[in-house]
Image (cartoon, grey):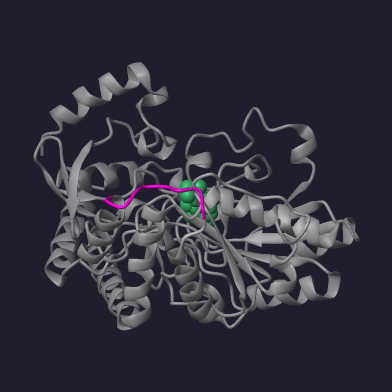
Amino acid sequence: MIYKRSSELFNEAQKVIPGGVNSPVRAFKAVGGDPIFIQKAEGAYLYDEDGNKLIDYINSWGPMILGHAHKPVVDAVVDKARKGTSFGTPTELETRIAELAVKMVPNIDKIRMVNSGTEACMSAVRLARGFTGKEKIIKFAGCYHGHSDSFLIQAGSGAVTFGTPNSPGVTQGTAKDTLLAKYNDLENVKELIAANKEEIACIILEPVAGNMGCIPPAEGFLEGLRKLCNENDILLIFDEVMTGFRLAPGGVQERSGVNADIVCFGKVIGGGLPVGAFAARNEIMDYLAPVGPVYQAGTLSGNPLAMAAGYAMLKELHDNPSIFESIDKKTEYLHEGMARVIESHKVAHTINRVGSMISVHFSEEPVTDFASSAKAASNGVFNKFFHGMLENGIYIAPSAYETWFINDALSYEDLDKTIEVVDKVAKTL
Ligand SMILES: *Cc1c(COP(=O)(O)O)cnc(C)c1O
């Protein structure tokens, strides 16, 4: 495939946009080469500026669970846009989407809308600190919670792809309040709690990690964290920005049966528009302004276009829960097919999958935390794999630390084509 126009556009972009992109992982820095500029998308496919048609496994990094330009979502946005795009006043639709989210997700009474996953996680931590009166937080190496200061301590995703685990600009004062634990290691968490008695406000994690590749929680890990939080008056925050409304209508809380104190959302909840949200039971949410003392606000929060897209998306997922089964089955099919062909070429690999999240690591060792993910990523095989796939019209994330997302617009024909390409590419690894 030829990607000439994309390269021209990338050159122009680099003159006026830092690195030519508005979010670092869109650049192909980790894998080399120029990023592909997309002109339009529909269903399971992206169409780029050179006229190539690509099967998309990024899905805007998660939101497009029903495929691109999904008609009910687009219709809802267009209809709203004609009536004005923002008022800065309450609107009925904000209540309707909140009711729907509260109905779908276990253990939450109220939800507050923001504009991104970053804002959701940042606000959730402020709320946890306000509610508990404590200042320190525990996060896990390799988990990504957006780019706010407290989280840029060994964050996953773009932050590790670019080798800036501790970003310049984050103060020592902020960094010292973030304690770093190893994913899937309860003993490590216990030690941190013991060494910081009465000081920890919350533990935040991706309850199924997706920003160091897909890494499932080990058996008993989430339950163990819940118990430790109960015993030490610590709030447990599930960052379900990636997993919410994807792994089940109620996210990982529903799937695992483990309750979080605060839950963060993003990606799917906005139907492809900029939305984040955080939610909890009444006693915690009522700590927020204007009812309570913890301040949080947003000029465009609950924006009518964003709410229209999000509501159309959630409504379809709510009314038609078989979608979750359908995407899980498609992902399982892809998993089995890829494992079979990669195996046949004797290429060392580990495939991790939870529901419709899947990642391929080129290492035989189990990938259970950031260290093992980084080890698998370090041999350069992924980069070769990535370019082989792209050359054959399959678009996966340009980093070994990212999860692939499966949307329901993908047909079994698309999956078969993908497996064929994996076969062809694995032969060259
Ligand atoms: C994407 C993501 C975020 C950040 O969301 P943005 O909308 O990019 O700010 C936070 N947490 C997790 C788990 C994510 O995957």
Image-quadrant location for residue 213:
bottom left
Return the x and y of residue 335 as percentages of the image width and height. 30, 69
Return the x and y of residue 76 as percentages of the image width and height. 28, 61
Image point 15% across, 64% down: which residue? 414
149 in relation to 427, above or below: above
Image point 48% across, 55% down: which residue? 302
Tell me if residue 359 can be seen: no
Tell me if residue 3 can be seen: yes
The one nearer the camera, 261 or 398, is: 261
Q: Can residue 85 be found in the magenta stretch?
A: yes
Return the x and y of residue 90 as percentages of the image width and height. 51, 58
Image point 70% across, 54% down: which residue? 125
Return the x and y of residue 142 as percentages of the image width and height. 57, 51
Q: Which residue reaches farthest top?
A: 15
Mainly helix, strand or loop, the magenta region?
loop
Question: Is residue 78 rendered to the left or right of residue 207?
Answer: left
Image point 40% across, 62% down: which residue? 268
Question: Is residue 363 rendered to the left or right of residue 51?
Answer: right
The one nearer the camera, 20 or 186, is: 20
Q: Which residues are magenta?
A: 82-89
Question: Is residue 113 rendered to the left or right of residue 390?
Answer: right
Q: Can residue 404 be found in the magenta stretch?
A: no
7 in relation to 23, above or below: above
